[in-house]
Image (cartoon, rainbow, N blue to C red):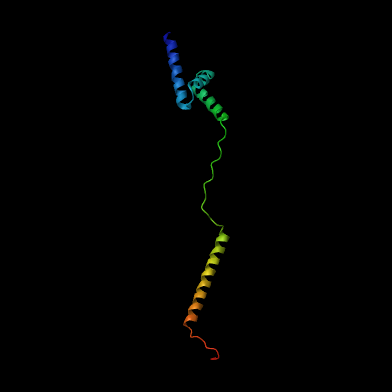
Amino acid sequence: MDDGAKEAKEKESQLIDAFLEISSSSRSVAVFFLESHNWDLDAALSAFLDNDSAHRSPSPAPAPLPLPLILPLPLTLLLLLLLLLLLRLSRNLSRRISRRRRAPARRPGTD
């Protein structure tokens, strides 16, 4: 083998190695694409990537992240008002109970 053929083989081997490093494909795929594109690494890689993306099935959309429980503002305000009403009612009830305990017992007929 003469020096020109050795240099050509060495250059082809370097192009194959570069293709393999970038594409993570098999050696036979690298040789196929490089030969098909007259050993032009950029053209071979572009064709490989275009071909590879066309044959891949689209990946499913990622699942949405769970959101914290957030109530709509009107519902939040309504619940807050109900809570305040219950608090006020419980205070009134406890005041009435404490007044009855402090008040002297009424005897029938002593008005």
Q: Position of residue 44 (x, y in %)?
A: 52, 23
Q: Residue furthest left?
A: 3
Q: Quadrant of residue 58?
A: top right
Number of marks in the image? 0
Is 80 left, or right, of 2 in this rendering?
Answer: right
Q: Residue furthest bottom?
A: 110
Q: Quadrant of residue 13?
A: top left
Q: Position of residue 8 (x, y in %)?
A: 45, 14
Above or below residue 13? Residue 22 is below
Q: Residue at x 44, y 22 (%)?
A: 17
Q: Residue at x 52, y 68 (%)?
A: 84
Q: Position of residue 36 (x, y in %)?
A: 54, 19
Above or below residue 3? Residue 28 is below
Q: In the depicted view, which residue is nearer to us: 75 or 108?
A: 108
Above or below residue 28? Residue 62 is below
Q: Position of residue 5 (x, y in %)?
A: 44, 11
Q: In the depicted view, which residue is nearer to us: 81 or 5?
A: 81
Q: Residue furthest front?
A: 108
Q: Residue furthest top?
A: 1
Q: Residue at x 51, y 25 (%)?
A: 45
The C terminus sits in image quarter: bottom right
The N terminus sits in image quarter: top left
